[in-house]
Amino acid sequence: MRELRGLGFTLESPHNLQQRHVRALAKSWEERGLSASTIANRISALRALSIWIGKKGMIQKAADFVSNPSVVHRSQASTEDKSWTATGIDIPALIGMIEQYDPRVGLQLRLMQAFGLRRKEAVMFRPLKADLGLGIRVRDGTKGGRERLIPIETPEQREILDFAKSKVKKVNEHIGHPDLNLEQAIRRFNYVLERFGVTKNGLGITSHGLRHQHLNDLYERITGAPAPVRSGSLTADIDQLTHDIARARVSQEAGHNRLGITSAYIGARTSPKRTDEQKADIARFKELTKIDDLSDQDAAELGRLIQKLNATL
């Protein structure tokens, strides 16, 4: 409302919000050079508001409200491996140094690597309460309050969980600093990491990179091949079912409902470009499979096409 007043609009009530107001705001944000994610998120908030005031459908795509749709285009797929190992970081050595300075923050980082936890989830982690034997329940600090179960599949995961359990005495005790509230504990976490250069401007990494590390390692453990963001087109050789199973596990462990969000961590699978000959063969294959009663000649051709496509695609 304040921004709209500054742009020359005087709304008496949020119920008077119209498309022209949203366009004016979006134009102002675009001219100020706000990032694509910021503009898109603000328009999403206005979309929610429009529904609450009974104007559902008034705001559709963010691209409809800016002069250059590309400024609000966001690619979900990561094109860069944000894992710590991708930058040549010796993870045990770096976390070991951090642990000597602040054991609590060091333990939080180990949990992030072992289970793909977010920063807030690691700070609020209650190991005694979370341990279910074959897996852990992640509940505190989750995004949107969505709890999830993460299987314990490696000796390293069990070892770090048992170590975390040894550092608390009560079922409801978390591994954050006991004398700090949540806000202070997160500030302490950020301070310690900045002190050791764990920033984009420092070592070129962030704590969130340990979450990427875990999820990309998980994909590779399931499929036997590096994730798309690590291997480029190599994953095109993995059958679709195996790829989808791995994506589902990554999505589940990350705490997301949509399979598509996994691309933000593991990258998008690319398929080799098809030649004109392959395209023609595929078109002919589809044409033949639609015929109910194939002649001997057509049946023979279909068989040859199947063998050829299997060998080349």
Image (tube, helix red, strand yellow):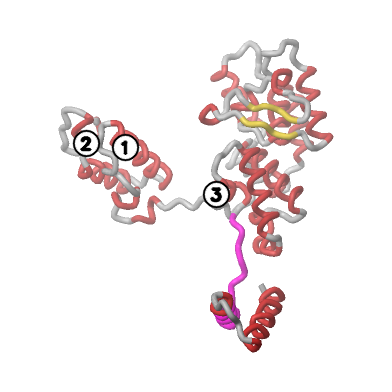
Quarter in which the C terminus is drawn? bottom right
Say whether marks 1 and 2 touch (CB < 8 Å). Answer: yes
Determine the secondary structure under disc 1.
helix
Of 270 and 97, the residue lying toward us? 270
Determine the secondary structure under disc 2.
loop
Q: Position of residue 250 (x, y in %)?
A: 65, 44
What residue do we see at 68% from left, 25% from top? 105
Q: Position of residue 294 (x, y in %)?
A: 60, 82
Q: Looking at the picture, which amino acid does disc 2 mark? A: Leu
Q: Give the spatial CA distance, label 3 vs label 2.
A: 33 Å
What residue do we see at 28% from left, 36% from top? 50
Residue under label 2 = 17
Is residue 188 found left or right of 2 in the rendered image?
right
Determine the secondary structure under disc 3.
helix
Nearer-N-terminus badge (3/1): 1
**Disc on res. 110:** none
In the displayed structure, 279 sits above or below 207; it is below
Is residue 222 found left or right of 267 in the rendered image?
right
Q: Looking at the picture, which amino acid does disc 3 mark? A: Gly
Boundaries of the magenta span: 268-285
Nearer-N-terminus badge (1/2): 2
What residue do we see at 63% from left, 42% from top? 205
Residue under label 3 = 260
Of 116 and 206, the residue lying toward us? 116
Neighbour tally class for label 2: few under 14, some 14-19, many 20 plus, Cα within 10 Å = some
Q: Nearer the viewer, mark 3 or mark 2?
A: 3
**Disc on res. 46:** 1
In the displayed structure, 80 sits above or below 41; it is below
Q: Give the spatial CA distance, label 3 vs label 1.
A: 24 Å
